[in-house]
Image (cartoon, rainbow, N blue to C red):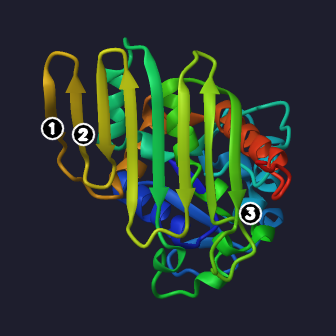
Amino acid sequence: MKILLIGYGSIGKRHCRILKETYPGCEIDLVSKQSIPGYRVFNDMGSLNGISSYDYFVICSETHLHYEQLAWINSRVSGKKVLVEKALFHKWAPLEPINNLIYVGYEMRYGPVLQFLKKELADQKILFAGAYAGQYLPDWHPHADYRNSYSALKAKGGGVLLDLSHELDYLQWLAGVIVEVVAFNSRISALEIDTDDIVTGVAKTREGTVLNFTMDYISKVIKRQVLIHTEEYSYFCDLIDSDIVKGGKLEGQSVIRFEKTSPDEPYREMHRAILEKAGGDSCTFYEGMKILQVCETIRNSFVEGACHVQ
């Protein structure tokens, strides 16, 4: 198998290592400005030779580059498998026709808690689903200056709304497509960034499920939690500690604990699903576009100071 990996920052290095470990015989070429020993490296997309020889394309560059790079690949090859790191693009934009099997890197779907919930909730009516994700941005990469990260720079497609859009993805994956949303999205802290550091909102799905979500760069305690209410049960889930407190009308409460796995495992399972299982539970291009549509709606509907309570 021959793979082209575009972008070699921290997430690109991770994908490269995981693919090498999972498929030891694969051949990986890189598109990067860096000089990387042991790999054939192209400085830019235009210098690529024999693009049709690649079986799998992985785009893990800065978000604002995704659309141009995907469009370039999609116009030159057909029937290939392409993974674009989340978020799909930095803003909604049409891409037609779709000539390849395109997926978006929302690997959290492959974590043990969300995999359990997907199966557990399949035959239940979900009344409410809530999600919270928070971590202080300077702590994301302690040995780097957060002010220079793409997360801090609007021009590079950063900001918490896209950065932590995992929550919007798995809420829709579990509870259905969002059709109504109202949210607050802004920068409220003293972080030296020109992007948003919080988004909090409520939404409704096509099936009538009420959603609540908050994602931020300001929490000094790392948290990633999900709360689900159905007609029969409630589930309080910790995605970091990998456990669920389940409560039922008749059964009372019980705790379901999952074995903690390496943070690499969801990525590994996502690649395996795309390459070996017709995509599996991976986020499709169209699902990724729906997430962008929700993000655009949030951005366009929230104007700071526009709404006042008398």
Task: Give the residue drawn at x 74%, y 51%.
Answer: 89
According to the picture, the residue beneath numbered tag 1 turns out to be 255
The image quarter containing residue 195 is: bottom right
Does the rendering let one see residue 18? yes
Measure how far apart labels 1 and 2 are at the Cα level: 6 Å
According to the picture, the residue beneath numbered tag 2 turns out to be 244
According to the picture, the residue beneath numbered tag 3 turns out to be 157
Query: Please, what secondary structure does the residue beneath circle 3 have?
Result: loop
Does the rendering let one see residue 49? no
Tag of residue 31: none
| 179 to 282, vertically: above or below | above
The image quarter containing residue 253 is: top left
Point out residue 14 in the picture as x, y percentages from the top left corner: 46, 65
Left or right of 257? Residue 105 is right
Between 125 and 155, the one nearer to me in the picture? 125
The image quarter containing residue 159 is: bottom right
Between 8 and 221, the one nearer to me in the picture? 221
Closest to the camera, between mark 2 and mark 3, is: 2
Kind of residue at disc 2 = Ile
Measure how far apart labels 2 and 3 are at the Cα level: 34 Å
Asked if the residue at tag 2 contacts the one at tag 1, i.e. Cβ–Cβ closer than 8 Å, the answer is: yes
Left or right of 72? Residue 106 is left
Between 149 and 228, the one nearer to me in the picture? 228
Task: Give the residue drawn at x 37%, y 11%.
Answer: 123
Measure how far apart labels 1 and 3 are at the Cα level: 39 Å
Task: Give the residue drawn at x 69%, y 35%.
Answer: 181
